[in-house]
Amino acid sequence: MIIDGVRAMDRATELLLRYYMAFNRGDWEGMLACLGDDVHHDVNQGGRETGRDAFREFLARMQRSYREQLRDIVVMANADGSRAAAEYVVHGEYLVTDEGLPPASGQRYVLPGGAFFEISDGQICRVTNYYNLDDWLRQVRR
């Protein structure tokens, strides 16, 4: 497939790749720029947070407790660019104990993950993240 930026599917794919490139650089403002003001964020096996400010707070919690890189990123989008998905492998390090989780001591983990997106007006308006929490817990409890 040639991505030429003309088709809605191409624009959605480019948006998600920009979002994940910003993640891998630790460029939280770059990630936030991809989001709509009222973005809905479905936290893995958790609740729904709404708004760019809530997402900023989520990123701050993540930055405090984890160092992660996403590899093998694959992005898929529907023809009209309104829905998309991504699959990736998280390579991470658990730095500081996150509330309600086991103690952190620099444990490393490798974990497949994915996300589902809704896109409107060139911005992400919903992010639903998923990874296998039991697998992550098994890896950090070793």
Image: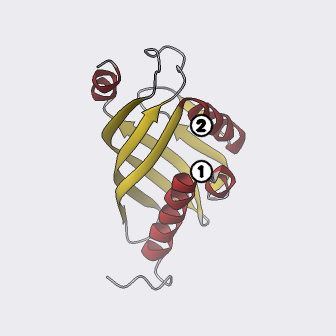
Q: Is residue 21 left or right of residue 27?
A: left
What residue is pinned by disc 1? 26
Q: Relative to residue 19, is residue 39 depicted above or below?
A: above
Secondary structure category for the residue under label 2:
helix
Residues at marks 1 and 2 touching, judged by CB atoms closer than 8 Å: yes
Identify the coloring: secondary structure
Between 11 and 87, which is closer to the camera in this rendering?
87
- Residue lying at 34% horizontally and 35% vertically, measured from the top left: 109
Instruction: Note whether 127 is above or below 22 in the view shown.
Output: above
Between the C-alphas of marks 1 and 2, the distance is 8 Å
Residue found 41% across the figure and 82% down from its top: 3
Residue 25 point in image, percent of width and height:
57, 56
Quarter of the image holding residue 131?
top left
Residue to which mark 2 is pinned = 63
Nearest the viewer among 11 and 58 is 58
Please give the name of the residue rendered at 53% of the width and 59% of the height, measured from the top-left corner.
119
Which x, y percent locates residue 130?
Answer: 37, 38
Q: Percent from the top left, x then y, of residue 61?
A: 61, 31
